[in-house]
């Protein structure tokens, strides 16, 4: 079984008095069956399937560096790590290439927004990401397609309730070290 190590983040930002989280809609190829169902019922829309930004840890890279890089690549925003949230573990079967079974570990962090425009990603990244959006934090869990990411999001909500997350805390030198 192949093993993959990834990292990602829950990026929080206050917009007009409401806390939001940055989510992505991964690119997915529609199967012929899905296409046929859509053709029969044009009014019926496919529910958006959103996810947290994340990606593989590159050789020589640490998980925190990967999380910040992946957030930027997949959402277009610059963010700073506030704290480690959790490691998730799961097995999946690749639906491309070799179709091999993969054991995956993803380390998630809560991050504070620093700068950038959501969905300002490169054309090359559009192969992976259809769009990136700010979603109200309290509504975000119901839009996430993976149960483990819903759990991570709830951890970020708990962290935010207990510790707060203001721009000062996101950029303060005293908050730059990871809490584990």
Image (spheres, grey):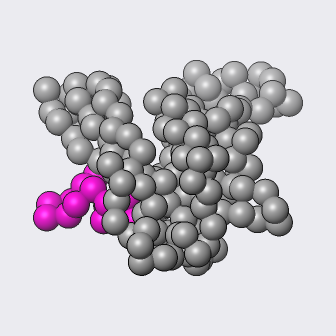
Part of the protein shown in magenta: 55-70
Q: Is residue 70 above or below residue 50?
A: below
x and y percent of residue 65 in the render? 30, 65
Q: Nearer the viewer, residue 156 or 72?
A: 156
Q: Nearer the viewer, residue 97 or 105?
A: 105
Answer with left or right where residue 142 lies relative to residue 69.
Answer: right
What's the residue at 57%, 53% (across, down)? Answer: 163
* 59 in magenta: yes
Residue 162 in sight in this render: yes
Quadrant of the rendered image containing residue 95:
top left
What's the residue at 64%, 47% (across, down)? Answer: 161
Answer with left or right where residue 20 lies relative to residue 157.
Answer: right
Q: Is residue 44 above or below residue 153?
A: above
Quarter occupied by the N terminus: top left
x and y percent of residue 133 in the render? 66, 56
What's the residue at 27%, 37% (across, down)? Answer: 105
Q: Nearer the viewer, residue 65 or 165?
A: 165
Q: Nearer the viewer, residue 122 or 147?
A: 147
* 33 in magenta: no
Q: Is residue 142 above or below residue 20?
A: above
Quadrant of the rendered image containing residue 100:
top left
Residue 153 in sight in this render: no
């Amino acid at each position: 079984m192949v093993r993959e190590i990834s990292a990602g983040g829950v990026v929080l930002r206050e917009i007009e008095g409401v806390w939001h989280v940055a989510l992505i809609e991964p690119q997915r190829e529609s199967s012929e069956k899905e296409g046929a169902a859509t053709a029969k019922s044009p009014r019926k829309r496919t529910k958006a399937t959103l996810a947290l930004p994340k990606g593989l840890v590159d050789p020589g890279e640490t998980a925190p560096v990967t999380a910040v890089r992946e957030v930027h690549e997949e959402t277009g925003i610059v963010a700073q790590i506030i704290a480690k949230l959790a490691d998730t573990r799961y097995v999946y079967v690749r639906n491309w290439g070799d179709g091999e079974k993969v054991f995956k570990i993803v380390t998630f962090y809560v991050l504070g927004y620093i700068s950038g425009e959501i969905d300002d990603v490169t054309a090359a990244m559009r192969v992976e990401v259809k769009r990136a959006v700010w979603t109200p934090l309290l509504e975000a869990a119901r839009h996430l397609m993976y149960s483990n990411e819903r759990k991570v999001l709830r951890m970020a909500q708990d962290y935010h309730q207990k510790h707060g997350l203001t721009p000062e805390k996101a950029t303060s030198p005293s908050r730059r070290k990871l809490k584990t």
